Image (spheres, helix red, strand yellow):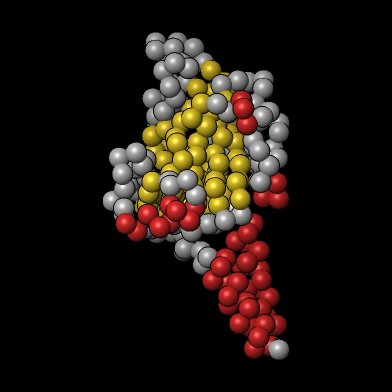
Amino acid sequence: MRFTTTSSILLTLFACAQAHLNLIYPTSRGPNHATQLTAPCGGKNDFSNNRTLFNPDGGPVAMTSSHPDSGIEINFCPSSSDCSSNDNFNITLVPTFLAIGAGPFCLPNVTIPDSLYPANRSSYLDGTIQVISYSDDGELYNCADVTISPQGAQVSSQCVNATGASSAPWKGSLAHSEESASASESGASATPTVAASSSAASSAMVSAGLLGTMLFSLVLVTM
Ligand SMILES: [Cu+2]
């Protein structure tokens, strides 16, 4: 009985660690849990054959995180041939902010700078969107290959937030930002707004820390 309980907690721990941060929209290069700490694209070095059309006037960037809080930053590499180093992702689309709440998280309106894309919207631009998560595990990387186009969607059914998800200013580290999170619940103007829709579907994942404590207690009981 104890063994079964311990096993299920271990499985839950594994499932949680398995998640890290997954980029849902635009479509990521694929599962990369084991190598997510590798810049610039979490170990996924090859361009996808299936680029998502991304609207320069504001498209959603949706993700799901197993971490109760993390710093999120979104960058862009304006190239179809060389996005092989972090230096190539030199366009900041969304400066680092603190994302609060595990589960789905979405920025509904990420825009591409006019300087990169012609104002008359007459051409297409291939590039790669990079999402960095500054987490308890370190810096986690995910990339999605896109074609910037006015035909890109401006809304997505995948753009949802976990119940209670919010954002707060980033203070340079997770610890400092967590300190400020409760103080500035309403958020500063520099902090991006998360999508208005909320998803009751995802039951909030218990934090790995809490599960670790539970597991530790169980081991003590077993001994
Ligand atoms: Cu993780």
84 relative to 151 in the view: left or right? right
Measuring 50% from the left and 39% from the top, which residue is drawn there?
73
80 relative to 205 in the view: left or right? right
**Residue 171, image x, y percentages:** 43, 47
Asked if one can make out residue 58 in the rendered structure from this viewpoint, the answer is: yes
**Residue 111, image x, y percentages:** 41, 28
Q: Between 100 and 55, which is closer to the camera in this rendering?
A: 100
- Residue 107's quadrant in the figure? top left
**Residue 91, image x, y percentages:** 51, 26
- Residue 214's quadrant in the figure? bottom right
| Count of numbered tags | 0
Q: Between 135 and 51, which is closer to the camera in this rendering?
A: 135
Q: Between 174 and 73, which is closer to the camera in this rendering?
A: 174
Where does the C terminus fall, quadrant-wise?
bottom right
Measuring 68% from the left and 28% from the top, which residue is drawn there?
84
Measuring 67% from the left and 50% from the top, which residue is drawn there?
33
Q: Between 150 and 72, which is closer to the camera in this rendering?
A: 72
Q: Is residue 183 shown above or below 82?
A: below
**Residue 174, image x, y percentages:** 49, 53
Measuring 42% from the left and 32% from the top, which residue is drawn there?
110
Asked if one can make out residue 162 in the rendered structure from this viewpoint, the answer is: no
Where does the N terminus fall, quadrant-wise?
bottom right
